[in-house]
Image (tube, rainbow, N blue to C red):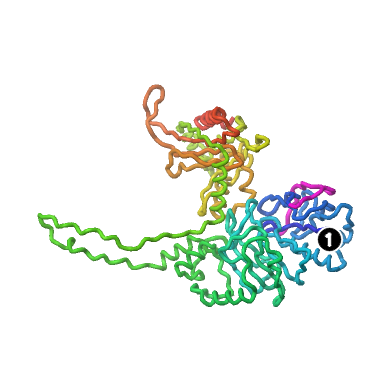
Amino acid sequence: MATVITMPRLSDTMTEGTVATWLKKVGDKISEGDILAEIETDKATMEFESFNAGTLLHIGIQEGQSAPVDSLLAIIGNEGEDISELLKGKTSPAPATEEKKSEETKVEESKSDNPVSKPTTQNPKPETTLPKGVVVVTMPRLSDTMTDGTVATWLKKVGDKVAEGDILAEIETDKATMEFESFNAGTLLFIGINEGETAPVDSVLAIIGPNGTDIAGIAENYKKGGNVAAPVAEKAAETSTETSNSQLPTSNSSERIFASPLAKKIAEDKGINLSQVKGSGENGRIVKGDVENYKAEAIVKPSATVMPSAVDTQPNTQDPKPVTQFVPTGEKFTEEIKNSQMRKTIAKRLSESIFTAPHFYLTIEIMMDQAMKSRATINTIPNTKVSFNDMIVKACAMALKKHPQVNSQWREDAMLINHHVNIGVAVAVEDGLVVPVLNFTDQMSLTQIGANVRDLAGKAKNKKLTPAEMDGSTFTVSNLGMFGITEFTSIINQPNSAILSVGAIVEKPVVKDGQIVVGNTMKVTLACDHRTVDGATGAQFLQTLKQFIENPVTMLA
């Protein structure tokens, strides 16, 4: 039977979307997981995949057109199927047979897509009919690489009324902790994944429906992975007990306090009432620094009084007294910090890279005197700020155009040479490392590179990067020079074939024209995947990079 696909809500603030590109046309066969279209939201352009198989029978929004969320986007069904009734109603067939009711339920669930990614709610099994008004909410896919999610915080408990748009929970992905809002109204009947638990995408997260609805057996029929919590009655009792035993007071139990999961954890550990903490984040959200600063101001521990030893109180004489033996006090303390989804993903990806790609490293020393003079001159222009990192990124982009072999990807059946240059810039964040991407870097000026890097780095530190802003790099730059690191090696950010490690600029004696003079040098190390980049190719790339940086005026040609 035909399925109506509606315009998804791909971000938490999205009210309408624009179809940038259709990747399928009417009459094409569709498999589950095929990319149907690229949809432009208020934050990014994202791929929208099909969760249904069949034939694309109708396209409701043409390329370049915009439409509100939940508008008819497409219809997928059996080849030659009559969809005239669907087109008349723009939603679902008029007859309300049991079969069509089930199909309407599936369509309604497909509208409950998550704020950032594609809809993930599973269709009911053929033998299972959901009670009227009941919706199964599954673990959403909140990033393009997410396979598992961890519930950091539940903001609703079993028995609570839920309105459309209410925040149900904060979910930790491999890249960030994000709020997950409800796209259905009703009562929270069931919680399938408890706080702190991790479960695969599409596992049963919650069940919402009319108060008092019997949902026995529904969770088990939908279960795809992860642990399902206790039945509703037990869960409600547990929640009530946990609430009554809470050590963290709040000024108003019905008033939601916006705070990051880390801030809540620190506040709980320190016994700080979050209602008394002023948030500095977006819309007054309380972040880690707010709790730590509050602690520093409000909690002052008295310092221990150290009594002088008998030896210290003795008058100074010619004969030295025996030194009192040091006796250690205190206790051994080890703190266990649960690995975040981001940390797990970093460990997995870098392990795969170092163990699958044969790395080799090439280091070259670059004279930075001319680069320093050029940067100082450029920054005299009003409202202009160019960093050494911006100059290095620009030089890499231009060198990659001359040596496209370094700008490649390895596949078992072929090597991909990228003739576009998208440079990823490694940015350290609180939970690990992210790599926002500058698309078509070679076409950017130094000032444009600088502005884009600052913007993306700011988003990264505030966990506001979208998946589209971290996707598609062809080469990566990692710079630790600002920390005084003079030389280091990096692990390749696959599927790239190379990554450049940038050290600090060092003032030291150098030889110029046969004379020893003071000069400024910088070491850079290129890590290469030997499957795609040979030693001579990497060396030629570094020679070109050196020429651009030592003579910045050549980058303007």
Vertical placement of residue 186 versus 22, above or below: below
Magenta range is 15-32
Q: Which residue is at the front of the view, 166 or 517?
A: 166
Comparing 134 with 433, the one in front is 134
- The reply to whether residue 447 is visible in this rendering is no
- Residue 12 relative to residue 376: left or right: right
Name the quadrant containing residue 321.
Answer: bottom left
User: Count the marks: how many?
Assistant: 1
Across and down, in percent, residue 521 comes to 44, 33
* Quadrant (top left/top right/bottom left/bottom right) for the C terminus: top right
- Nearer to the camera, 447 or 98: 98
**As drawn, 481 above or below 370:** below
Q: Which residue is drawn at 55% across and 39% down?
A: 499
Q: How many other residues sit within 10 Å of disc 1, few (<14), some (14-19) or many (≥20)?
A: some
Is residue 29 in the magenta section?
A: yes
Inspect the image, locate mark 1, and give the three-letter code of the amino acid beneath it: Lys
How far across and down, in percent of the image, does residue 497 sit?
59, 37
- In the rendered image, residue 192 lying in the magenta stretch gets the answer no
Indicate the position of residue 309 as horizontal and vertical percent values. Answer: 20, 63
Secondary-structure class at tag 1: loop
Instruction: Identify the image quadrant of the N terminus.
Output: bottom right
Q: Is residue 225 left or right of residue 73?
A: left
Residue 205: where, in percent of width, then height?
65, 64
Query: What residue is shown at x 63% (from left), y 69% (from top)?
Result: 191
Is 349 or 85 nearer to us in this picture? 349
Q: Pointer 1: what residue? A: 90
Indicate the quadrant where residue 168 lies: bottom right
Whether residue 307 appears in this view of the structure is yes
